[in-house]
Structures are given as C-alpha cells and as structure tokens.
Image (tube, rainbow, N blue to C red):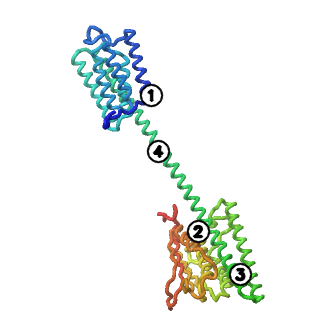
C-alpha cells in the first residue's frame, strides 16, 4: 500500500457472515430459477441478476464500519436490480443495510434516514398511482414502505433502546462511584473523629504524667517524688478509664457520637468544666500556673428560656477547653490561664488565654507536643460550621499571651459535612 492511501477498516465478523449468507442464498435462488420480475419486461436477463446481488453483499460488509457508504451502495444495487430478473435476497439484504445505517450511523444520519425513507415511500406511492391509475398501485407503495421505511423505523427504536441502556449503565457506574466516594469519606471522617476523641481523652492525662515524672526525676526530695508518683498513678488510672470508655463506645454503638450515646457512657458537657479547672490547677501549681474560669453565658443551663445547648456543641466546647488547658500545662509560661465562656442567641464563644514567651522562652515546653491538638480543635469547630483561631497576641495590659478562640453556632446545626442547614 502506498503512503497516504486510505486503509479500509476490517469488516466485523458478524457482517462478513451476513454478507456470505446473503450471497449464498441469492445464488441458490438464482440456481432454482426463482425471480422477482418477468423476463420479457427487463432489459438484462440471465446472470446479470448476480451483479446487484454481489454489490449488495459487499455493502453488507460495510454495514457496521461505514454505514452511510453501505446505504448508498445498497440503494444503487437495488435500483440496478430492477433492470434484471430480480432477486428476493437482494431486497432482503437492502432492508438490513437500511436498518444498520440508522443503528450504527451518526446521530444526524439516524434522524435523516427515516425522514428520507418516508419521503421516498410517499413519493413512490403517489408516482405509481399516477402512472398505473389503478388501486393496485397502492400495494407497490406498501412494499416500498416495507423495504425502506419499516427497517429505518426499526433501527430508530433499537438505537433509542440501546442509548437508554447505555445511559442507565453510565448512571449505575456513577452511582457506584459516588457510593464508594461516600464510603471512603465516611471512613476518613470516622477515623478523624476517633483520633480527636482519643487525643482529647488521653492527652491531658499523659501530659500530666510527663510533667510530674520530669519533676520526680529532677528533684531529689522523697516527699516531692512521692506526690509526683501519686499524681502519675491518678492520671494513669483516669487515662485508662477514658480509653475503656472510648472502646466501649466503639463496640456498643458502632462508633456513634458520644453526644448521642447511652446514659451509661454520657459525653462530658460544660457543666464539668469546673472539674477541668481544678484538675489543671493541681497539675500546674508546681510550674507556677494558676487557672480561672469566667462563665458569662446568658442562657446557662437553659434557665432563661433559650433551652440547653445541643449535645454536639457541648461536647465540642468541652473538648476545646480540655485541649487548651492541656496545651497550657505543656507550653505556658508561669502566670494565669483564663477560660471565658460567653453565649448569645446565635453562638457560644470559648476563649482561653495563657502566658506566652515564644518558642525561645526561658521556661520552654514542659512536655512534648505534636500539634494534633490544634488540628483537632479546628476540626471540631469546622464540623459545626463554627470559627476557630489560635496564636500569640498582645494582652490588654501588655505582654504576650497565647489565645484560643472558638465560636460555635447554637441556633442551627450544620448538615452534610459542615454546611449550614437552610
């Protein structure tokens, strides 16, 4: 083959089988003397009938790969067949070519071919009536419609059914893909929730253990060491209890949110913040830290008609205070750590401030940190469509402080991953 020559696509094996079957059938009809037209009324007799038959069989080879070319070739072969004795197989193969041109052709061809076949049928019927001037000419019009229009309409129906099936298959695949994405996102969200709960439950106790174990190792006083070991044991027991509580939640409720758990495993709320402050005061006293709580909520405990806070908001606020106190125990400079709670009709605000001397401060951190606590607090606020910010700032009376501020909406809860409901 020369460079630049057009290479015809290889016929589909089913098309080759149809073409071969039609050619053999047409030869059998010719050998048996079965003809469509009278011999004395056609200019070409004898073996001439095989020429349109062969051309039509060749058109069948192109019915799937080049459907429009096959239709034009088949139409020419059908017209040529009218000048011979005629072969029924040639006509039958032409109906298949029309059907294939609609089914496998372009969308534009699929719309135009039935219209063209309808016009040919109407024109042929009117022309035959005008030529013969006999009602029997209507039969020839019906035959014309059966040969051209009927297979075209059949092709339209099959093509529409095929397109609908393909669209349904694509929708099913998209649904499956979206379901897999939702499942993956649900798994990731659940793992993140478990990580936040585990960190917030245990980090405070482990931080206290690290601080007091450091004091016990650095101070040779037996009494101080005994007190430090007592605190270490207390926090170890409490941390183990928190771990068992989390494991119980995962086993009993399949990882349900602690805010909706059974009363036996009720989630902590802001009513327990006083206990957090007392615990932090006991742990931070050796480091020169003092802790204070200012609860200025308008609707505290729901006594003014606003109603209690939603359970997810209570849990998120409690965990943010808990983690902020843990960070203060690990990193804050000696001084006062203040927790302030305010609430109005729309939001609950949690503000925690602690003394801060920067990364190069003289005191430095008393326990190592990974930054997971800040990430967890930010995620908790984001899940409720709230705002969270943390970082160093300047206090009103001068000096640097580390400030954690979270604003949690209480008027409406978000749905679908943190989007506010309408």
User: Alpha carbon of mark 2 to alpha carbon of mark 4: how far?
Assistant: 39 Å
Residue 242 horizontal/vertical position (percent): 69, 70
The outermost residue toward the front is 2
The outermost residue toward the bottom is 397
Disc number lying in front (3 or 4): 3
Q: Quadrant of residue 159?
A: top left
User: Alpha carbon of mark 3 to alpha carbon of mark 1: how far?
Assistant: 83 Å
Residue 339 in the figure: left or right of residue 248: left
Q: Which mark is residue 213?
A: 3
User: Alpha carbon of mark 3 to alpha carbon of mark 4: how far?
Assistant: 62 Å
Q: Mark 1 sits on what residue?
A: 14
Describe the element under mark 2 as helix, strand or loop. helix
The outermost residue toward the left is 130
Disc 4 crowd rating (10 Å Cα; few below 14, some 14-19, many 20+) is: few
Figure check: 146 above or below 321: above
> Quick one: label 3 or label 4, which is nearer the N terminus?
4
Describe the element under mark 4 as helix, strand or loop. helix
Q: Mark 2 sits on what residue?
A: 312
> Quick one: label 2 or label 1, which is nearer the N terminus?
1
Disc 2 crowd rating (10 Å Cα; few below 14, some 14-19, many 20+) is: many
Disc 1 crowd rating (10 Å Cα; few below 14, some 14-19, many 20+) is: few
> Quick one: label 2 or label 4, which is nearer the N terminus?
4
User: Alpha carbon of mark 2 to alpha carbon of mark 3: how far?
Assistant: 35 Å
> Quick one: label 3 or label 1, which is nearer the N terminus?
1
> Quick one: label 1 or label 4, which is nearer the N terminus?
1
Front residue (pair 371, 390): 371
Disc number lying in front (2 or 1): 1
Residue 137 horizontal/vertical position (percent): 27, 16
Q: Is residue 300 visible?
A: yes
Instruction: Tell me what residue is drawn at x 29 percent, y 14 percent.
Output: 84
Figure check: 215 above or below 138: below
Q: Are marks 2 and 1 in contact (CB under 8 Å)?
A: no
């Amino acid at each position: 083959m020369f460079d630049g020559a057009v290479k015809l696509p290889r016929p589909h094996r089913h098309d080759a089988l149809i073409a071969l079957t039609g050619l053999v059938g047409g030869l059998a009809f010719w050998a048996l003397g079965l003809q469509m037209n009278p011999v004395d009324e056609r200019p070409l007799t004898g073996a001439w009938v095989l020429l349109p038959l062969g051309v039509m069989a060749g058109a069948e080879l192109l019915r799937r790969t080049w459907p429009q070319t096959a239709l034009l070739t088949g139409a020419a072969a059908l017209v040529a067949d009218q000048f011979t004795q005629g072969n029924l197989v040639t006509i039958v193969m032409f109906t298949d070519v029309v059907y294939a041109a609609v089914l496998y052709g372009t969308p534009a061809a699929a719309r135009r071919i039935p219209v063209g076949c309808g016009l040919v049928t109407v024109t042929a019927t009117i022309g035959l009536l005008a030529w013969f001037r006999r009602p029997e000419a209507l039969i020839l019009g019906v035959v014309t419609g059966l040969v051209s229009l009927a297979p075209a309409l059949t092709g339209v129906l099959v093509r529409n059914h095929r397109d609908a099936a393909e669209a349904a298959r694509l929708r099913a695949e998209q649904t499956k893909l979206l379901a897999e994405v939702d499942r993956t996102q649900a798994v990731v969200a659940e793992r993140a929730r478990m990580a936040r709960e585990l960190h917030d439950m245990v980090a405070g106790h482990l931080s206290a253990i690290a601080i007091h174990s450091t004091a016990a190792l650095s101070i040779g006083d037996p009494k101080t060491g005994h007190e430090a070991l007592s605190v270490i044991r207390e926090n170890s027991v409490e941390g183990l209890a928190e771990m068992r509580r989390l494991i119980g939640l995962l086993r009993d409720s399949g990882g349900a949110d602690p805010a909706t758990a059974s009363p036996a495993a009720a989630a902590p709320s802001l009513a327990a913040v006083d206990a957090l402050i007392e615990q932090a005061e006991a742990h931070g006293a050796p480091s020169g830290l003092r802790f204070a709580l200012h609860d200025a909520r308008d609707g505290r405990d729901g006594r003014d008609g606003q109603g209690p806070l939603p359970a997810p908001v209570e849990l998120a606020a409690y965990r943010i205070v808990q983690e902020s106190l843990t960070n203060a125990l690990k990193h804050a400079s000696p001084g006062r750590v203040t927790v302030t709670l305010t609430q109005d009709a729309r939001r609950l605000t949690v503000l925690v401030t602690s003394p801060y001397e920067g990364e190069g401060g003289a005191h430095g951190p008393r326990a190592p940190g990974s930054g997971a606590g800040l990430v967890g607090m930010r995620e908790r606020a984001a899940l409720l469509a709230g705002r969270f910010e943390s970082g160093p700032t300047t206090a009103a009376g001068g000096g640097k402080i580390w400030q954690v501020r979270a604003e949690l909406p209480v008027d409406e809860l978000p749905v679908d991953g943190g989007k506010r409901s309408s």
